[in-house]
Image (cartoon, rainbow, N blue to C red):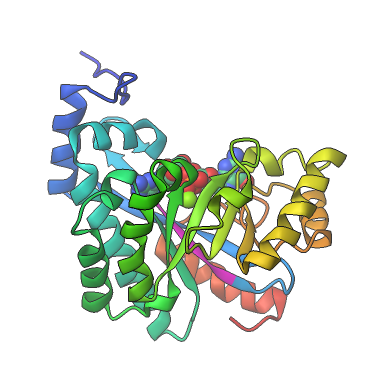
Amino acid sequence: MAKKPVNSDANGEDQDLTNDLALALETDQFFLVYQPTIDLQTDAFAGVEALIRWRHPDHGVVNPLTFIAGLEASGQIIPVGRWALNTACAQGAVWHAKGYRFAVSVNISYMQLDRAEFADDVAAALSSSRFDPALLVLEFSQRTLTRDAETTLRQLAPLVALGVRLAVDDFAPGDSPLADLERFPIDIVKLDKGFIAGITNAEVAAQIHNLVQRARTMKVQIFASGIEDEEQVKRLQLEEVDIGQGFFFSTPHEAVEIDRFLEDFAIFSGKPL
Ligand code: C2E
Ligand code: MG
C-alpha cells in the first residue's frame, strides 16, 4: 500500500510524521544544502544560507516547508535545529580552512530561541567547530522577534555577546515598519522574496529605496531574497541593496557542489573569494 505523502495538518500534529522524523534524525536522513549569497555592489561571493532537506526513504528529498511545522509541533525542532547549527558551523570551518572566508547563515525556529540553553548550544557549535563567530549569521523571522520585545531583547543579548550576527528573515514592510525592529541588535534585514518579485512596480521600488536609506541610519545591511532575473539585480543595485540571493545566482546545493561553484565563480567573475 502506498504511504501517505509527507505533510502535517494545520497544527503540524501527525503521529506518523512525528515517528518518521524521529527515525530521520537517528538514521541521518537530514542533510543541509547551501545557497550562495552575493554582494550586489561588488559582485563578490558573500556567503551561504544553510537549508535543511530530508532524504525520505519513500518520498525522496523533501522540502522543509512540509516538515518544519511537524518538527515544531513535536518539539523535535530542538535536536534537529541543534544538528543543523552544528553541521553548518562544521562545514563553515572546512571552507574557512580552505581559505574561503565567508558568512554561513542558519535559520532558527522561535522554539530554539525560547530555550534558556540556546546561547549555550550556539557557543558549543562554535567551539567544537572552531568556526569564527563573526562569520555565523542566525536568522529569525520577523514574527519571532516581535512576539514580545522585552523577552526577545533578553534572549538576543547572550548571542550578541558571542559575536555572532543576527538577521531578520522574510521581512515584508507591509507586516510592520522597519522602525519596529530598530530596538533589536540586528545586523541584516532580509527582504521577503514576494516583495522582491514586485520590484518593477514603482511603488515597491520606492519602498525599497526608503528601506535602504533607513537601514543606513540603523547601520544594518539590506539583503534581497528570491532574485530570479537580471532586471531585478539591476534595480536592486540601483537602490544600493547590499546583498542578494536567488535562483538567478544559484539554487541551493550540497557542500561539495558549492566547492565547484566557488572555483567557477573565482574564474568567471575574476573576483577574489
Ligand atoms: P527561508 O529562510 O526564507 O529560505 C529561503 C527559501 O527560498 C529556500 O527555500 C530557498 O530554496 C528559496 N529560494 C531561494 N532563492 C529563490 C528564488 O530565487 N525563487 C524562489 N521562488 N525561491 C527561492 P527552502 O529551502 O524550501 O526553505 C524554506 C524555508 O524552510 C526557509 O525559508 C526557512 O524558513 C525554513 N528552513 C530551512 N532550513 C531550516 C532549518 O535548518 N531550520 C529552520 N528552523 N527552518 C529552516
Ligand atoms: Mg532564511
Q: Position of residue 102 (x, y in %)?
A: 50, 75
Q: Quadrant of residue 65?
A: top left
Q: Residue at x 24, y 31 (%)?
A: 73
Q: Position of residue 120 (x, y in %)?
A: 20, 66
* Count of marks, rendered view: 0
In depth, the one of 146 and 117 nearer the eye is 146
Q: Residue at x 61, y 41 (%)?
A: 172
Q: Say which quadrant the C terminus sits in.
A: bottom right
Q: Say which quadrant the N terminus sits in.
A: top left
**Would residue 224 appear left or right of 120 to someone viewing this image?**
right
Q: Position of residue 80 (x, y in %)?
A: 23, 49
Q: Is residue 52 visible?
A: no
**Would residue 256 appear left or right of 222 to someone viewing this image?**
left
Q: Is residue 37 magenta?
A: no
**Would residue 223 appear left or right of 43 to someone viewing this image?**
left
Which residues are drawn in magenta?
46-52
Q: Is residue 33 visible?
A: yes
In depth, the one of 70 and 114 nearer the eye is 114
Q: Residue at x 31, y 19 (%)?
A: 9
- Kindly report the secondary structure that dominates the magenta region of the rendered protein: strand
Q: Quadrant of residue 92?
A: bottom left
Q: Position of residue 209 (x, y in %)?
A: 79, 54
